[in-house]
Amino acid sequence: MTHPAVRAEGTTTDTEPASVWGADGRPMVTVVIIMFNDIANVGTAIRSALDQTLKGTEVIVVDDCSTDGSFEYVSEMAKSEPRLRAFQTPKNSGGPGAPRNIGMDNASAPYLTFLDSDDILERHATYNLLTAAERSDADIVMAKTRRREIAKKKFRGWHHRLYREEQHFDTIEDNPELCIDTIAVAKLYRLAFLRDNGIRFREELHYEDLIFTAEVFAKADGIRVIPEFVYQWNLYPIKVRKSITNQRDDIKNLQHRKVALAEVLRVADRSVVPLLHDRLQLKILRHDARLYLNDIAAGQVPNLAPELLAELRPLIESIPIEIYQDVPRDDRLLIAAALSGDVDLVTRMAKIAAGTWDLYGDWEPGGVNSLWEPATFADYPVGSRERMLATFDSAQVTSIPWYSFKFFTKVDSVSIDGSNRVRISGEIPDSFGRLDQPDLEARMLIRERWGFQREWTAPVAWERTVDGIVTWSTDFAFPSDLDFAVRPKISIRMEVSNGIASTLLPLRVKKGFSGSKAKTQTRGLIQSLANVRYQPYATEIGTLAFRIARIGKQRRRLRAGLKSLLQSGHSRLRERYIPLEAFEVASQAPQIMASASTRIDDRLVVVESHMGTSQFDSPHVLAEEIRRQRPDLDVVVSAASNQRWAAGRDDVVIRNTVDYYRTLARAKYIIDNQSLPDGYVKRPGQIYVQTWHGIPIKTMGFDEPNFAFSSRDEVSALERKVGYWDFLSIPSDYFRDTFVPAFKYPNGQLPVGSPRNDILVNDSEGIAAAKRRLDLDPTRTAVLYAPTFRQRGQASIELDLTELVEELGDEYQVLLRPHYLNRISIPPHLRGDVVDVSNVGDTAQVLLASEILVSDYSSIIFDYLSLDRPVILYAYDLDDYVNSARGTYFDLREHRPGPLVTSQEELVDAIRAVGDDADAQRRHRFRDDFAGREPGDSAAKTIATVWGDK
C-alpha cells in the first residue's frame, strides 16, 4: 500500500549540487528516519546520520503525524541542510510500516538503511556498510547493534555471536542462523533489490519487522556480515516510553504476533528456503514464545498468565515435532510446562532455561527416558507432545560437577537482633544430589562493595533432608567498623568448597521477603545522630544484600555535617586494604620500606604466588613444608585485592598496600614464583627464594629479541630484580641451560625439581581417587585441554565443543583449563561433557585426574610428564607461534612429547589413538631432554638447603 506523502515546506529539491553527494552527483546511502512525537530525540538521530564520515549520506525523515511539533522542527532543520528532506504521512498510521515505505519510495541513493528517531547511528556506520556492500555486491549487509539502557547507562549486545568476523553468504541457506536478527535497522539494503522484489513493510500489521526481514532473507542474493558496530538502540524504561511491541500485558499483543509469524512462515516458503523456514520455526519456540513465558515468570502479567498460556498453546503445537530436536533440554521442559498450563512450573522453568540456575524439582529416573515432574506429566500418553517434551536424559544433569552447578540458593528469612547479630536461613533444592559429596563445607562471605572492600566470613550450618532439600543457616555479627562516611553496600554470598574446588552461590530473595524491613541498631552518639543503619534488600537481579536504610532530608543534612566524625581509624585501614596506585608504586614503595623498622624479623617468611592471585604453586607448597618442619617461623601470605581464597585468613597481607611493603621490609625470607612489584627494594640480610612458574619454550629475559631495543633503565631494572634472587629452583638441566643464562642469574641454584610437582610424583591413590575429588565421571576418559596464554580476557579455545563432544562420544569427558588470565564459556547443554576446571585452584589436582593432556606451548606439558601419561599438542597456530618476533628455544615439530596436530579433526583422531600409547618412547625422550625427572622431594630439599645447617 502506498500513500501520497506530505512534503515539508522549504525542504531541498530532488537534485542537489554534485559536491554534496558522491562522484556521480547523487547520494550514496539514504538513511530513513521515522518518528512520532519525538521532538526530544529526533535531532540527535538526524545529527548522527548527517555527521557520518561518508558525506554522501542522504537523510529522509518521515513523520507519522506528530502532535508535539516534531515535523515542524525537522522541516526547519531541512531549510539549512541540503542533505535532509522531511515528509509526513497523510494520517497517523499507528506503526512504523507506512513511514518506512514512504522513505523507501523517496530514497534517491542505491542503498538505504533505517533509523528510529530515538536511536543513533555510529559515526562510521554508512561508510562501513557501503564499503562491505560494494566489495561483495550483496543485496544486504548486516552489522552489529549495541543496546543502551538509558536508565542504567549500560550497554548490552544483540546477537553478537553472529558478527565475530566478516563473512559472505550467497543465500540465507548457507547460514540460516542469521535470521534470528529480525530488526530492520543495522542493515544496509540494495534499493533495486527491494523494489524489484516488491519488498515493503506491511502497514496493516504489527511486528512488521519480522515479516520484512524474513522476506529479505528469503530473496537476498548475497548477504554480507561485518563485525563493526553501526547502530545504537536506546532502551528506555517502559514507564517513560512503551513501544507497540513491548505492550505484552495485553492479550492482543500475542494475537498480533501470531498473525505476523504466520505470514513470516509463508514468505519464507519451505519449498524455496527450507533451512530458513525450519530455523524460523525454531525461533518461534526459543524466542517468540519465550518472551511471553518470561513475562509470566517475572510476574509482570499475573492476571493474564492463564490466558497467555492458552493463546500460546496452538502456536506451540503448530511447530512440527522434528523441530524440537534442536531445542535444548531446559527449553523443552519450559515448553512442556507451558503446554501443561501450570503457571508455577512455567515460572520455575523460565529461570532455569535462562541459565539463572540449574534444573531442580521432582523427577522419575529412567536414564535417557527420565521423566520431569511426574505428578504433572505422567498422566499424558507416552506419544504425546507433552510427555515427549518432559522426557530428558538425566545424565546430562548428574554429570555436571557440583562446582559447575548453578544452585537455587533460596533465602527463607533474615533477622537482626538488638546486638546486631544477623541470622539468615534458607534451603537449596538438590534434586540430583550434586551437593551430596564428601568433604563439602560452606561459609558466608560478607563483603564491602566499595571503599576498603574488606571481606568477612561466617560459618554455615546445613543438613540434607530425605527429599533432597539442603536446609542451611548462618549467624554472624554485622560488621561494626564499616566506613560510615562512605556507607558501602554489603554483598553476601555462600561459598561451597572441598578444599580443592569451590563455587560461589548468590542468595536468592524476592522483594518483600521475610525480614526485609529489619535494621541494624546504631552504636554511639555520632552514628545515632546520623542514623546510620543497615537493612537487607533484594537487588535488581534478585539476590540478598545490605544497604543503608533511607532517611529524611533533615537527617541527610545532619549526616553530611557529621561526615568527618563518622570516619574512624581510616588511615590505618587504608594502609592495610587499599593498594597504592600503579603510578605511586615506584616512588612511594621504597620510601615506605625505608621508613619501616630497621630490624629484620628472622622468623618472618613472606610467600607470594602469581603476583598474589593464587594460593597454590611452588611457593605455597614450600610454605606448607615450612609449617611442618619449622613451626617456629611465621608465614605471611601475599594476596592481590579481592581474592576469595584470602577471606577470613589472619595470615594474609594485601599486595601493594602500605602494610605489604612494611611486611616485605621486615621479612627475613621471601618466596616468590614470578616477580615482586617494582617498588620492592631488597634489604641487606634478606633471603629471596625464586621458584619460577614453569619451564620455557619461548625465549625469555635478555634472550627476547625485543630486549635489544630496551632502554638502559629497563635493562637495569631486570638485572636488579634478578640480582635480588638468592636461590632459584632448577626443574631440569634444560631449564638451567636456557633460563639461567637468559636472565643472567648469578646466585644459588636449588636441587633439581619443582616443589609443586612433588604431589604428582608421590600420588599413591591414583586416577580414580583424583576424579572423585573433582566429581568427574569415573567411567569416562578425562581429556584435559590446557592452552597457553595468548591475550588477557575471554579466551578463544579454537574448538567447536558441540562437534568435539559428538565426535568423541560418551567415552570421553573433556576438562577445560585456560591460562589464569583468560576466561572461557561453555554452552550450558555441554557442561556434563565439557567441564570448566578453572575453579579448581590447584593445577596438580587437575593433572592427577586427567588421563590425556592436550596443550600447545604451555609449560603445563613439562609438569604433566611427571605422570608419564599421553600428551597431544594441538598447535593450530604453530607457524605464527614459531615465527613470532619472540622466538622459541627449540622447534616443537622436531622435539615433541606426542602427536602434533593442527586441526580439530586430527585432534579427535589423536585422542582416539591414545590407547596403544605408540608415543611412549618419544614422550620419555622429550621428558629426559627438557623436563627432567622429578625427584618427589623438591620441597623438603629446598627447605633443607635454605633453612638447614648451612
Image: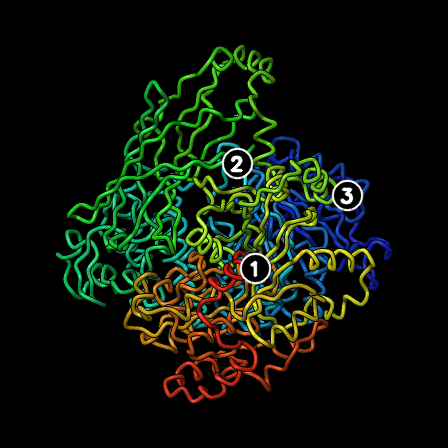
Q: Name which of mark 3 and mark 2 comes first in the sequence.
A: 3
Type of amino acid at the residue the image marks with label 2: Gln
Residue 543 visible? The answer is yes
Type of amino acid at the residue the image marks with label 1: Lys
Residue 186: % across, % down? 61, 55
Residue in the image at 70% along x and 70% along y: 742
Element type at marker 1? Answer: loop
Q: In which quadrant is the N terminus drawn?
A: bottom right
How far separated are the C-alphas under marks 3 and 2? 59 Å
The image's colouring method is rainbow
Residue designated by label 1:
950
Residue designated by label 2:
453
Quadrant assignment, res 793: bottom right
Q: In which quadrant is the C terminus drawn?
A: bottom right
**Foreground label between 3 and 2:** 2
Closer to us: 223 or 599: 599
**Label 3 with label 2: CB-CB less than 8 Å:** no
**Label 3 with label 1: CB-CB less than 8 Å:** no
How far separated are the C-alphas under marks 3 and 1? 94 Å
Residue designated by label 3:
11
Residue in the image at 47% along x and 15% along y: 531
